[in-house]
Image: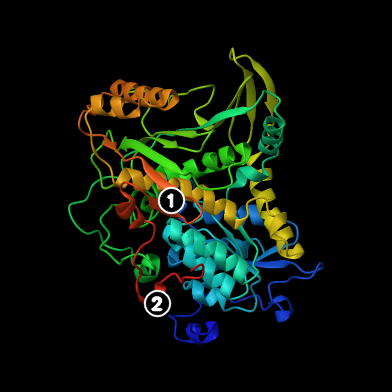
Amino acid sequence: MMRRRSFLKCAGAGAVTLGLRGIGLPASASSGLAGANDAVRLAVVGIGSAEAKGGVGGRGHQLINALRKVRGARIVALCDVDQRILARQAAALKEQGQPVAVYRDLRRVFDSKEVDAVVVATPNHWHALATIWACQAGKDVYVEKPLSYNVWEGRQMVAAARKYSRIVQCGTQARTSSAVQEAVAWVQRGEIGPIRFGRVILYRERSSIGKVSGPTPIPPEVDYDLWCGPADKLPLRRQQLHYDWHWVWPTGSGEMGNNGVHHIDVCRWAMKLDTAAPRVMSLGGRFGFDDDGETPNTHVALLGYQPTPIYCEVRGLPEKKGSKVMDSFLNTGLGAVIHCEGGYFTGAHLSGAAYDTQGKKIREFGPTTWEAMDSGHLANFVAATRSRKAADLNADVLQGHLSATCCHLVNISHRLGQAAAPEAVVERTKFDPVWSDAVARYHEHLRANGIDFAGNETLGPALSFDAKLERFTGDFGDQANALLRRAYRGSFAVPDLAG
């Protein structure tokens, strides 16, 4: 393998000037092992567009605001392939008395002796390579969810963290929510009896991303080669470059990976499931509009853990046609549900409640605030960079990998699926009463939205997964294994560290 510094000498362009200069901090903490009295110097890689339709204001931008509230953390550099976004964010920090170094090429960030740790908030397809390169350069990493773009990449990220003795935290912030921590501990103590199964309820309205008739011009301020990185450099065939990458397979993982991963992670945590799901099955489609999106906007899936499975429900359409209200189920429209013998818990990031078998509320958890949770998760990461103990992390890279893998397995089942008649769907899902009920309610939801789904929904095969080897077995195993990793572009190949 090429030595890190030699590689960087032949990599692309260096720091972007933009009229801003690096802050010139001393190199004494460049090893990534900041002393107790030193600030941990962080670079944020990937800022995100605050103007993108459908987005949440740019996740990197949000993390910058959260990091500024973390004692002992100091933002010293920003990186983004979009020069307009980069300049605007750097200028805002400068106005607040915090000038930073600015870069377009993340490789230059990793080569900087002025950076101890990096926050990766790029699109999904960059998460693995950015994390691994950072680990190889001696940087600790906070990487946003879902941890990986595919299963194989996630395992390489875990291997990099261990091989290079790096602290790597995944951005599944609910693990730092005081409300969710209290609820998980309460459920695990058996306060409402043994756990029977879990649910993911994700009813979040999404709109069409539009449809183009041909390639769309790349914004002139974007280095598109760097934006594509490990993915194939294909013509842009959607209206919006930023954010809508979530809804196409070369770069995203759909709503299951975008937000479903949060609630799958809470279910796994509460239910003490320490592997990826050994069996998966998927049903769904992209309903309600004709656009350039590829991923399902209405999706139900079975994660076949035994004896405590997880059932996932994603809905991007309102409760019925013409309504502006989303559905709800079991007292939530967004969250994890843990079913126990004596009742159930339901909740999301900031709050939750427990109910008995008759639906009577018996306990509340929280609320906390998004600021406390988001900054707290970053503070947990910063503290672990000081202790050098991965066990101090609330969401170690391995946990991020396992939860992301569950999402990838569901998506693989979907991508291998075929159109099926409603009668065939009902017949093939009736083996599990809870799964069959979720499918029936999914069909009712589509009918309420005026969707003719007969022959238009995709039923994925039931796939068996060897969670230890991280390979599919049995029927459709060869086809499914082909989707565990991707082909890479030249110098953007993710290295094999776990083989």
Amino acid type shown at disc 2: Ser
Instruction: Give the vertical position of 292 relative to 126 (above or below).
Output: above
Outermost right residue: 37
Q: Residue at x 43, y 24 (%)?
A: 327
Instruction: Give the vertical position of 461 relative to 478 (above or below).
Output: above
Q: Position of residue 331 (x, y in %)?
A: 54, 22
The numbered disc on residue 392 is: none
Q: Which residue is mark 1?
A: 51
Q: Residue at x 40, y 77 (%)?
A: 491
Q: Residue at x 36, y 56 (%)?
A: 481
Q: CA distance from mark 1 to mark 2?
A: 31 Å
Q: Position of residue 250 (x, y in %)?
A: 33, 57
The part of the image, by quadrant, that contains residue 340 is top right
> Regarding mark 1 in the picture, which secondary structure is present there?
loop
Does residue 324 appear in the picture of this structure?
no
Does residue 332 appear in the picture of this structure?
yes
